[in-house]
Amino acid sequence: MSINWYKYASPATFYGLAGRLIPGFAWAAAVLAAAGLYIAFFLAPTDFQQGEAYRVIFIHVPAAWMGMFIYLVMAFWSAVGLAFNTRLSFMMARALAPTGAMFTFVSLWTGALWGKPMWGAWWVWDARLTSTLILLFLYVGIMALWAAIDDPRRGDRAGALLTIVGAINVPIIYFSVKWWNTLHQGASVKPSGTSMDEVMLAGMLVMAVAAWFYSIAVAFARVRRIILERERHTDWVNAQLERA
Amino acid sequence: MDLPTLLSAHDLECARGERTLFTGLGFGLEAGRLLLVQGGNGQGKTSLLRLLTGLATPAAGEVRWRGEPIRRARERYHREMAYVGHANGIKEEFTPLENLRLEAGLAGRALDEAAAAQTLSGLGLARCLDLPARVLSFGQRRRVALAALLTAGALLWILDEPLTGLDVHGVALVEELLRDHLAAGGMVVMTTHQPLTLDGVQVQKIRVGDWAPAARR
Amino acid sequence: MLRFAAPLETREEDASSSSLRFLLTVIRRDLLLAARRRGDWLTAQFFFVMVVSLFPLGVGPEPELLRRIAPGVVWVAATLASLLSLTRLFADDHRDGSLEQMLLSPEPAVLLTLGKAAAHWLIYGIPLLIVAPVLGIQFALPWDAVGVLVLSLALGTPILSLLGAVGAALTLGLRGGGVLLTLLILPLYVPALIFGAGAVDGVISGTGAEAHLSLLGAFFVLSLILTPWVSAAALKVSLE
């Protein structure tokens, strides 16, 4: 049995599909986030080394994962769009970028909050922090490029090319910063290597899944808006608008 | 004798931003023929020419050269096609001679100075050979662009408003160039707002406005 | 009488020789242009010297401190100077229509972007190598560190030109293109900056420069192989 993927690659079909899926993802995200936060604040034990402050990692770690992961997904959709000329792929990349940038920013922010009690400094030029900062710069650059280009077709392609160049560059940046860092200040800023409690791990995973569902719901909502905007001269959009 | 259709367009659709300029546009052009692209401002004349050169890609449909889509036969097509757009493609810092020779080099060809000077003189630029293009008038620069067109030795010319900025003599010169090119079996696709007198030339016409989405519905 | 009849059969020529002619013409053309516009060229060089010279005024004249920051300062200034000139890499040719003509050449666009980046390096990169030793001495760098500084710039400035060409192609013809170019390209410069400045640092601190230089070389080779294709694709996107 084969699924007709091209059918779902058409913006008109996907518009309806995304609309039906959004509530499910949104509710799942809300429930899981509530559960995750409950685990984080009430079930997870106090860390004997870091005290209560460590609880920020329940937000920090999932946010950092998502920031990085969403960039990879954007790069994937960009490559698909350039290779197969599918409009929806570019729209997905555009819809994901703000969420990715938001998670990257949150992970930097919470990282600073966590770093103060842990390392005694709001900011250290550690490999992960530095490459996350540069990842945020990349997100900002891509969104600025989209904003500067009026023609949607050109914007899609230019943004996709930049995303892919960035995706090749991010690992290089990560390793170069890591290497630079070990030469400069040694391994003095490593987080304490305590073995992770099972409850803590569970809480983190629940939060991560919540972040996934949230990202999907928000990206779908955004992609629906982009579709409407792009296809506002077509018959099906006008029919939709009249019904609404 | 039946001449072969060398250039053809099939179901071309062109969108500028959100607006569809034309859709389903098609034609065929034989050797020795001139295609005059007509239409009002903003109807997509320049867009159509850019699709035909391969600089822009159509939203749908394709352009074929010698029966092959130009996307696949790009190298051969660009060897046999020359384009003069709104901008002349002339560097102001260079003299007409340098411009011509560099342009040949950019097409991967060699052009010796004597041949370049001869072509430029033939277009009435004998006295400006060594002046930087900066000091030339607009019409003179247009003539340099036409000289580059001649030295390209292309079979197909695509010309976007070649008469702009030319005086009466210039217009007559272009008409002569076109006649000679067509008589030698060359092909031309062009736009112009000015009247063109081409006796003994078979002119094919296409109105981009006829293919606008609203007109077809 | 066919006064202007051009030869309609194109001369058959060896494909590789015409590609080489194309590449060399692109480079020669830009060199010739730079020679005719010496003012622009001098501006970029003085910008580099001035930015570097501002630092001692800002942080104080202690030789110890200057020696510590010299590699980073020279390298950051080099990235900024290259960006300054990169904004016009394709913009001038775009304005007068010659960029379109170059893309309509039968030769592949990747040779165009490669030639453009090479010309940019010859015009704006090599002078930095010549000025850098003077700046190194100003910053009290030892001689072996000055040598490595020049070497790191020799390996690293081509990366700046190659990556910068991608940004210049992406931002072609956009309003505020210059600032946007900076925003897009500076993050991508980070590895070159780290390896380049790190090599000089390695000499000063005694840990050696070989590892940094070989990584810089690897990054250069990677950029040389990949970026001309991306720039070519970006140019086509920007011209549609």
Image (tube, coloured by chain):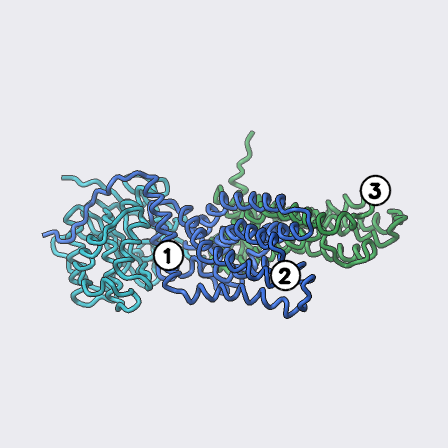
Chain colours: A green, B cyan, C blue
Name the residue type under label 3: Met
Between the C-alphas of marks 1 and 3, the distance is 66 Å
Amino acid type, mark 1: Ala
Q: Residues within 10 Å of mark 2 (few under 14, many from 20)?
A: some
> Which residue is more in the foreground, C23 or B59?
C23
Residue labelled with disc 3: A196
Mark 1 lies on residue:
B214
Q: In the displayed structure, would residue C81 be above or below residue A9?
A: below
Q: Nearer the viewer, mark 2 or mark 1?
A: 2
CA distance for labels 3 and 2: 50 Å
Q: Amino acid at mark 2?
A: Ala
Q: For the N terminus of chain B, give its image quadrant.
A: top left
Which of label 3 and label 2 is nearer to you? 2
Q: Which structural element holds mark 1?
A: helix
On the same chain: label 1 and label 3?
Answer: no
Q: Nearer the viewer, mark 1 or mark 3?
A: 3
Query: Which structural element holds mark 2?
Result: loop
Relative image position of residue C230 (x, y in whole percent): 48, 47
- Asked if residue C219 lies left or right of residue C97, the reply is right
Across and down, in percent, residue A69 comes to 65, 46
Chain to which mark 2 belongs: C
Q: Nearer the viewer, residue A73 or B23?
A: A73
Q: Which residue is mark 2?
A: C140
Return the residue found at the far top: A1
Return the residue nearer the eye: A136 or B15.
Answer: A136
Say whether marks 1 and 3 touch (CB < 8 Å): no
Q: Is residue C1 visible?
A: yes
